[in-house]
Image (cartoon, rainbow, N blue to C red):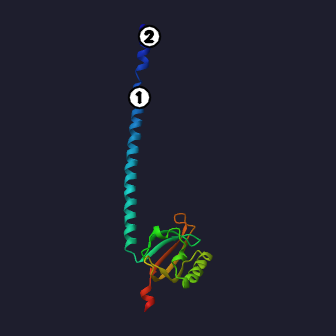
Amino acid sequence: MKAHMENLNLRAAPELPAHDALIAKLRDRISDLEEENANLRRLDEVIRRNARLFDAALRHSHDGFFLITPRLTFLKVFHSVLGNTDENLAGRHVLSIIHPEDRAALETAFATLLSDPARSVTCQCRAQDLHGDWCWMEVEMTDLLDDPDVQAIVFTNRNITERQVR
């Protein structure tokens, strides 16, 4: 029985050096994870701050900013000087808000852009605002389809109605 008890005692007692090394390794790993978590929280705050800056800049901008597909469909509305929103334009064809007399000019400019994506193209046309009124717009188109962060055509526009009325 004494031999049996000695076997139990040997099995129950952990090897202290190996056990201490394991605990030290786990503590180091926990410390590394806590540091990584703190870095991620700081990064998250930087991203949130940049998003707030971007939103504020767009809210006070005199330019509209849209992402458009190669089929002339609204992909994303970041800011519209005509009061339109992503909810009422996303998925719609761009020409649906362009004055019928100006659609050909916009289509021609768009075709020019697609044939030479290295340059931006600008055109003037009338677009319908959220209330149904027609406003003269200057639209600049830039092809960023090959940019992996954008993968769309960027339309920036400015209301030039006052300039056209003079």
Task: Name the residue located 39 percent from the left edge and 30 percent from the top edge.
Answer: 20
Secondary structure under the numbered disc 1 in the rendered image: helix
Instruction: Specify the amino acid type for callout 2.
Output: His
- Please, which residue is most extreme toward the bottom here? 166
The N terminus is located in which quarter?
Answer: top left
According to the image, label 2 marks what residue?
A: 4
Task: Name the residue located 40 percent from the left edge and 63 percent from the top edge.
Answer: 51
Could you classify mark 2 by the number of other residues whose Cα lies within 10 Å: few (under 14), some (14-19), or many (20 or more)? few
Residue 72: which quarter of the image?
bottom right
Residue 71 position (above or below residue 163):
above
Horizontal side, residue 110 vs residue 132: left or right: right
Secondary structure under the numbered disc 2 in the rendered image: helix
Nearest the viewer among 105 and 13 is 105
Task: Name the residue located 45 percent from the left edge and 75 percent from the top edge.
Answer: 64
Q: Kindly check if marks 1 and 2 are in contact, taking CB atoms under 8 A apart as contact.
A: no
According to the image, label 1 marks what residue?
A: 19
Task: Name the residue located 58 percent from the left edge and 83 percent from the top edge.
Answer: 104
Instruction: Specify the amino acid type for callout 1.
Output: His
Residue 108 location (% of width, % of height): 60, 81
Indicate which label's residue lies in the foreground, 1 or 2: 2
Residue 45 position (above or below residue 132):
above
